[in-house]
Image: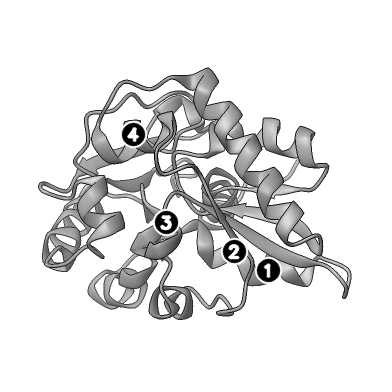
Amino acid sequence: MNLVAPIGILMLDTRFERIVGDVGHPASFAFPVLYRIVAGASARRVVLERAEGLLGPFIDAARALQAEGVAGISTTCGFLAGFQDELCDALEVPVLTSSLLQVGLVQRCLPAARRVGILTIARAGLTPALLAAAGVPSDTPIGATDPDGAFNAAILGDAPLDVAAARREHVAAAERLLAEHPEVGAIVLECTNMPPYAAAIAQATGVPVFSVIDLICWFQAGLRPARAG
């Protein structure tokens, strides 16, 4: 058995810089990953237009990765939780579409008085239907990065990425989330471009921060368990 069979990752069709920690950078993982771009799937179209008309291209790209021998498939956008069931039904390998799928697990780890909060790139995009598709309660506290900030401009507009400014914006967004919802005891990062800022968020807020990188590493560990001894 191949114990290092790769994870396949469905890439949005973007031009912005992907730094280490971003799910789209292969050095973010300690195991092999294979990428396939879904033509026409811009960040703006997926995040702000609910990936309208893109299910077929995502299935085709996922099947191509499956044919290359991947052990499982993930994506580069948390808003693709809406395609979770359809991709699972179309493929023969396990699928993990979104960081949002871990919200319920993180909630089970917290004291009764604490709740999971979500940090997203676009609050309006987390519709009740999308949250339901990911198994997330509709009253979950949600915060968002500045829609006019450097991070959103880079990701949604394919503009140059100012990493220092993006880090400051993530810390500020997380601090706003906790100020509005002091019961939040852990944060799940919806966006797959947010993991590079997880450490800064955790340091500033004092609460655990979970990203899609953490979830994909868990996914890979189960798909290809390490040998003991």
Where is residue 105? Give x, y as percent.
68, 68
Residue matched to label 1: 105
Whether residue 227 can be seen here = no
Residue matched to label 2: 102
Which mark is first along the chain, 4 or 1?
Answer: 1
Residue matched to label 4: 153
The quarter holding residue 159 reads: top left
Of tags 4 and 3, the one toward the viewer is: 4
Of tags 1 and 3, the one toward the viewer is: 3
Please name the residue shown 42% across and 78% down the image.
Answer: 133
Where is residue 131? Give x, y as percent.
47, 74
Amino acid marked by disc 3: Gly
Separation of marks 2 and 1 at Cα, in angstroms: 5 Å
Please name the residue shown 74% across and 62% down the image.
Answer: 181
Amino acid marked by disc 2: Gln
The secondary structure type at the circle numbered 2 is helix
> Contact (CB < 8 A) between labels 3 and 2?
no
Label 2 neighbour load within 10 Å: few <14, some 14-19, many 20+ = some
Of tags 2 and 4, the one toward the viewer is: 4
Of tags 3 and 2, the one toward the viewer is: 3
Image quadrant where one finds the C terminus? top right
Separation of marks 2 and 4 at Cα, in angstroms: 27 Å
Residue closest to the eye, 206 or 1 = 206
Amino acid marked by disc 1: Leu
Where is residue 221? Give x, y as percent.
59, 50
> Contact (CB < 8 A) between labels 2 and 1?
yes
Residue matched to label 3: 78
Separation of marks 4 and 3 at Cα, in angstroms: 18 Å
Separation of marks 1 and 4 at Cα, in angstroms: 31 Å
